[in-house]
Image: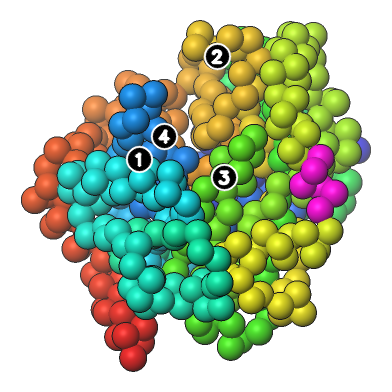
Amino acid sequence: MSSGQGKTDVILIGAGVMSATLGTLLKELVPEWEIKVFEKLGSPGEESSNEWNNAGTGHAALCELNYTPENPDGSVDISKAIGVNEQFQLSRQFWTFLVNKGIIKDPSEFIMPLPHMSMVQGEENIAFLKKRVEALTKNPLFYGMEFSDHPETLKDWIPLIMEGRTSNEPIAATKIDSGTDVNFGALTRMLFDHLQDRDVQVHYNHCVKGMKRTADGSWEVKVEDLGGKNIEYHTAKFVFIGGGGGSLPLLQKTRIQESKQIGGFPVSGLFLVCKNQDVIDKHQAKVYGKAKVGAPPMSVPHLDTRYIDHQKTLLFGPFAGFSPKFLKTGSYFDLIGSVKPNNIFTMLAAGIKNIPLTKYLIQQVLLSKEKRMEELREFIPNAASEDWDIVVAGQRVQVIKDTESGGKGTLQFGTEVVSAEDGSVAALLGASPGASTAVHVMLEVLKQCFPSQMKEWEGKIKEMIPSYGISLSNHPEFFERIHEQTAESLGLMNKQQEVSRVMES
């Protein structure tokens, strides 16, 4: 049974933070455009954007050691860290615009101030951490970052981690107070409430089954209404595929040239969640460690204070795992179904290149809870097994493609936009830093897909995001002003002072 065809300007596939951000940007830039959203699940932000399916870190490269690799000559490359931080500043500015406009009523529903820290053990790692902080603090984006290897200072910064520590191995950390904990699930729900108020048609329990070009260059999207089991057909001039791990199969259905020779490798995640409030209350930071050899960047261990539904909690992980599903709610045939004649050699090459990663993931899958507790005890020496439960986090699909630098079948770690040459369709693939840089990524989508309108939209974009087109790291006074304004509007400044007072007392 099929229903009639509906025409619209824009179709967004997936009701996650990326579609929410793009839809909100478009409603500000071209309010007259009609937008339809199709989401397989019953509510927004239930897959990758859900607060239990990601670390909730406002990724600004303040604590993530994998964004600052060591060069062969021993120097530290901070270029990626600067890029990620600049991108997060765009998100802060856009969220500030939404708060000032009344679209977001209470920013504390989704963002909280939280120190970001890096922690390492061993003389070699401490030497690297010192070089890292020296390189970063020369840049205004990282002013205020402190380093210490003094046990008494570390007891003030990370009392839970230092408590009961008997190892003689030296330990050091960096701390910066301008970090944030972000509930991307709550943010997504707020933005979709707003979009529905702006007459955006959001269809939940609707699964996109296929896409094909029409004679006039538009896209016809085949959608199944999972409630009534009806098949619907909708056409749009522009389609954005923001379905998390489900984006790659949908991109392949477009058959655009840009979708060829791209594959995906799914990585799942688990977190240990603390259920002892006394333990939770002793920690107030996001503390990132160093990834084990062979581990994917998304598996960098970290001990995170989280604020979920205004409830403070504590998570440790993630532990990587493997599932052939591309989504938590996906199919066990997702991975094999993504192998096509045009990407099979790319996928095979990736398999040969990444045997150590595959071995690592198998080892992670086979870990018992007690083995996971042993890894936690590298952070919290006296962690008790009965205080922690295991929670299954989200699926991430790492992009596999042929690159000039890496050759055939190179596994990409990051976030990537793939768009048709004519800009009529775009898809978001990949993982971290993901949601934190959603505004930057969606501006890239607009740039790639609407190049002729960007000049016309530039004034409005700068109204929403004052630093658009400007490198904040090259304009320290402008950055300081922007950072203070966003901290004030997002409620981070006063809360940061309150948090500091609580920790001192």
Name the kind of residue labelled 3 in the image. Answer: Ala
As helix, strand or loop, the secondary structure at mark 4 comes to: loop
- Of circles 4 and 1, which is in front? 4
Give the Cα separation between the discs numbered 4 and 1: 10 Å
Residue at x 58% of width, y 9% of height: 407
Q: Earlier in the sequence, mark 1 or mark 3?
A: 1
Image quarter hosting the C terminus:
bottom left
Disc sitting over residue 81 in the figure: 1
Foreground of the two, 382 or 390: 382
Residue bearing the label numbered 2: 406
Residue bearing the label numbered 3: 291
Q: Earlier in the sequence, mark 3 or mark 4?
A: 4
Horizontal side of residue 356 vs 3, given as left or right: left
Give the Cα separation between the discs numbered 2 and 1: 21 Å
* Mark 4 touches mark 1? (CB < 8 Å): no
Q: Earlier in the sequence, mark 3 or mark 2?
A: 3
Name the kind of residue labelled 4 in the image. Answer: Pro
